[in-house]
Image (tube, rainbow, N blue to C red):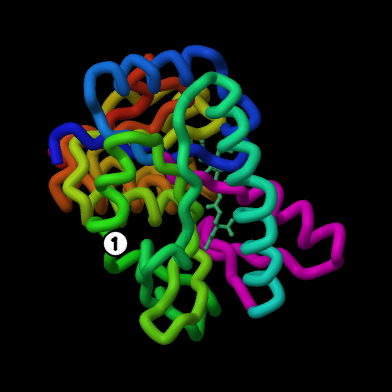
Amino acid sequence: MKDLVIIKIGGQAISELTDDFFDQLAVWRTQGKKILLLHGGGPLITKLCQQLQVPVVKKDGVRVTDAQTLALTKLVLLGQAQPLLLQKLSDHQLPVVGLNAADNQMLVGKYLDQSVYGEVGTVVSVNQDKLLPLLDSYIGVLAPLAMTPAGNWLNVNADQAAADVASLLGAKKLYLMTDVAGVLNQHHLIPRLTKLVSQKLVAEKIISSGMQPKIKAAFAACTAGVEQVAITNCLQNPGTIITKE
Ligand SMILES: Nc1ncnc2c1ncn2[C@@H]1O[C@H](COP(=O)(O)OP(=O)(O)O)[C@@H](O)[C@H]1O
Ligand SMILES: CC(=O)N[C@@H](CCC(=O)OP(=O)(O)O)C(=O)O
């Protein structure tokens, strides 16, 4: 879908959004583009877990999620992170609609590997019939949670959710907005990144923690046909462009 732009905003990045970001969304809207935002909330989830003395376990940047962690994750994503982003967009006079997996099978998911990650999943389908008409009038804001056909909630890494949704909807552009300018090697921005080079940088531990699921998601979207995939902290700066070759 050539006019669809998907932007994932990391939990940290939500509180660091500048006027440039909102201005760019306004420009895209006047150009008739559909805009869908996928928000994170990882730092807030970790903070609440720590306050309640619930163990925080991550594996390759993905939160290992038991039933208690899932309940806290839903609380934070739907009660804190999403309203914060909706309010910021509204304050900039942008029309918004907040969405989540429980809205008419909006995001249907499957388990990633329950024996390793617990209640964590990936997105396998999107209710396009409901979503796409909404995007004609509103900027959609989606939480990274999915639901199995049996009605079980799944925690989905927000980079993975954005890449899955971008791939399923055939989006033209995917921006993974984070708190760093892009993928860095000893403080230097890598302008273009191939899979081969990224694998080398992961092995050398130059790419680590939260950047790992981001890179994995970015290459998955690229392989699935999303034309432009970028990791950046600003929509006006290309950051790191993910390329097949
Ligand atoms: N090579 C790298 N380049 C840039 N950031 C990296 C790299 N390796 C690890 N990181 C870490 O990844 C973080 C971004 O991932 P994460 O904290 O999960 O952000 P988000 O919440 O936006 O998804 C950066 O703040 C940085 O600490
Ligand atoms: C399974 C998994 O890792 N889910 C993530 C969902 C939120 C997220 O990804 O938020 P950020 O983009 O701010 O990191 C988590 O629980 O932290």
Closer to the camera in the image, 93 or 67: 93
From this viewpoint, is residue 203 visible? Answer: no
Closer to the camera in the image, 190 or 39: 39
Quadrant of residue 95 within the rendered picture: top left
- Residue 103 locus on image (x, y percent): 44, 63
Q: Is residue 8 left or right of residue 6?
A: right
- How many numbered discs sit on the rendered protein? 1
Q: Which residue is rendered at x = 51% and y = 60% of the image?
A: 60
Q: Which residue is mark 1?
A: 127
Q: Which residue is rendered at x = 19% and y = 36% of the image?
A: 172
Q: Which residue is rendered at x = 42% and y = 27% of the image?
A: 232
From this viewpoint, is residue 7 visible? Answer: yes
- Residue 151 locus on image (x, y percent): 46, 81
**Looking at the picture, does residue 161 appear above or below residue 53?**
above
**Looking at the picture, does residue 136 appear above or below residue 67?**
above
Quadrant of residue 121 within the rendered picture: bottom left
Callout 1: CB less than 8 Å from ligand 2: no
Q: Which residues are magenta?
A: 37-66
For mark 1, give the secondary structure. Answer: loop
Closer to the camera in the image, 123 or 192: 123
Q: Which residue is rendered at x = 42% and y = 49% of the image?
A: 159
Q: Is residue 35 left or right of residue 68?
A: left
Circle 1 residues within 10 Å: few <14, some 14–19, many ≥20 = some
- Residue 245 locus on image (x, y percent): 13, 38
Closer to the camera in the image, 197 or 83: 83
Q: Is residue 179 left or right of residue 31?
A: right
What residue type is disc 1 on?
Asn
